[in-house]
Image (cartoon, rainbow, N blue to C red):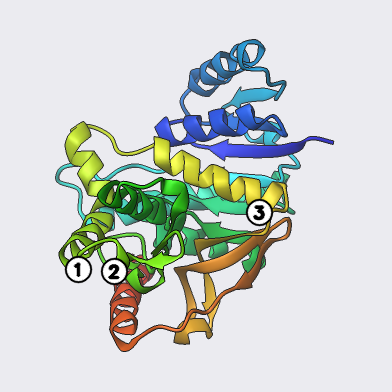
Amino acid sequence: MRKKVTVVGGGNVGATVAQRVAERDYADVVLVDVVEGMPQGKALDLAESGPILGYDSNIIGTNSYEPTKDSDIIVITAGIARKPGMTRDDLLRTNMSIMKSVIAEVIKYSPNSILLVVSNPLDAMVYQAYVNSNFPKTRVLGMAGVLDTARMRTFIAREANVSVEDVQAYVLGGHGDTMVPLVRYATIGGLPLSHWLSQEKIDAIVQRTRQGGGEIVSLLKTGSAFYAPSAAVLQMVDSILLNKRRIVPAAVLLEGEYGVKDMFIGVPVILGESGIEKIIELDLTDEETIGFNKSIEAVQELIDAMENL
């Protein structure tokens, strides 16, 4: 039986996730959005690509949740971006409300699914998904670290003039300016970055990684990144549905790991068919720990703000 992936939110990220999953040809896709006709039109357009690209995935666009029944994975991209004049609390309040309504619907029809949250602010929204779903912690996670790590690997490869395939890196912490790119664990062909790049260039890569999303927003003028985010989601979906057991950074619930309790934060995990199979604890230096703690504080501020709304 084919797997089934529901994508909630038919904007650029959601629609591109639907496209990437459909083109894999191992799962059927349901694209859900509140805008009448939009998910249906995008689903039909994707279906009509099948004969050309050679996939038979069944793609449904809908404004209701009944067609999502018995999904294996629910990818949640729904939410609004912060607009001029909107406070952080306004954004949190709106996206919390959207997340709560989405979770209520998806768990009704797919109580055994895995929830993969992409909506921003990521670390706060995945926490909301967990609280509202009552799912076990192994089946609720957020996508951010794969994207941030991919950006770091891209910048490293370009500076060193090597293939991105030979670059390994990890980014921990929250999805934002306080993320922690782990230079010490980054390698090119198994050799440390210091073998290839000056400290000045390494520092510049770290800073650019932290501001990676903002750099794209400033270039686009309207909207934000969606090609790389959708690719990051696909890597996680692949690892789960194909039981690849990839080691990837993801926002997961920590209950004592890294000295953190009851918070979703980005750390390396093993992803398999049951969801989060293992949280990997890396040894951090004092400097890395300080950076990680700052990231935790930033996420805690978001959670506190949500609880006070």
Q: Nearer the viewer, residue 228 or 3?
A: 228
Q: Earlier in the sequence, mark 2 or mark 1?
A: 2
In front: label 2 or label 3? 2
Residue drawn 33% across and 39% down?
Answer: 225
- Check disc 3 and report its element: helix, strand or loop: strand
Residue under label 2, please give it: 194
Task: Name which quarter of the figure residue 47 lies in.
Answer: top right
Q: How many marks?
A: 3
Task: Using residue 258 as the reference point, say whether residue 151 is left or right of it.
Answer: left
Task: Using residue 114 as the reference point, say whether residue 305 is left or right of it.
Answer: left
Relative vertical location of residue 3 with respect to residue 38 in this rendering, above or below: below
Q: Residues within 10 Å of mark 3 (few under 14, many from 20)?
A: many
> Can residue 287 be seen here?
yes
The circle on residue 114 is 3
Q: Amino acid at mark 3?
A: Ile
**Image location (x, y in percent) of residue 255:** 55, 81
The circle on residue 199 is 1
Q: CA distance from mark 2 to mark 3?
A: 39 Å
> Can residue 105 be seen here?
no
